[in-house]
Amino acid sequence: MSIVHSGGLGQFQKDNATPHASRVATKWLQKHSSDFKYFHWPPKSPEMNIIKDSRDALLHAVEKRSPPPRTPMDLLTALQDSWSEFPPGYLQTPVESMPRRFASFLRARGGPTRY
């Protein structure tokens, strides 16, 4: 965090994902809690980040490639090629869904939603 946000403005979003809630991670976060701020997130809250959906689709496309990338340069090329194969306007649907996602999130008061 100190490297990425050297001005001390970074916040860690602890979203209760398994890696963030493990004993090792919890112990490390407690030890280093003065190094950064937490952005507290309700447990089991709905996923509001459309970037994760896009990332998952991109990684899935790369995993299907044959032969698989073997070097960092191969991976970069595979990512770029896979991204260029997505249809034009690929991100338009998730972006347009955000008002509905937020409305559902607010109605559920941060609890589970259909998204």
Image: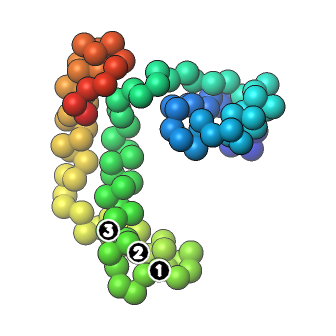
Say above or below: 62 vs 107: below
Instruction: Report the mark closest to the observer, 1 or 2.
Output: 1
The one of 108 and 10 positioned closer to us in this rendering: 108
Element type where label 1 sits in the image: loop
Residue depicted at x 72% and y 28%: 36
* Residue type (three-letter) at the residue carrying disc 1: Pro
Residue to which mark 3 is pinned: 61
Q: Counting other residues with Cα less than 10 Å from the Cα at mark 3, is it few (<14), some (14-19), or many (20 or more)?
A: some
* Residue type (three-letter) at the residue carrying disc 2: Ala
Relative horizontal placement of residue 18, taking residue 6 as reference (left or right):
left
Is there CB contact under 8 Å for labels 3 and 2? no
Say above or below: 40 vs 97: above
Element type where label 3 sits in the image: helix
N-term mark: 3 or 1: 3
Residue to which mark 2 is pinned: 78
Residue to which mark 1 is pinned: 69
Residue most extreme to the bottom: 67
Q: Position of residue 39 (x, y in %)?
A: 57, 23
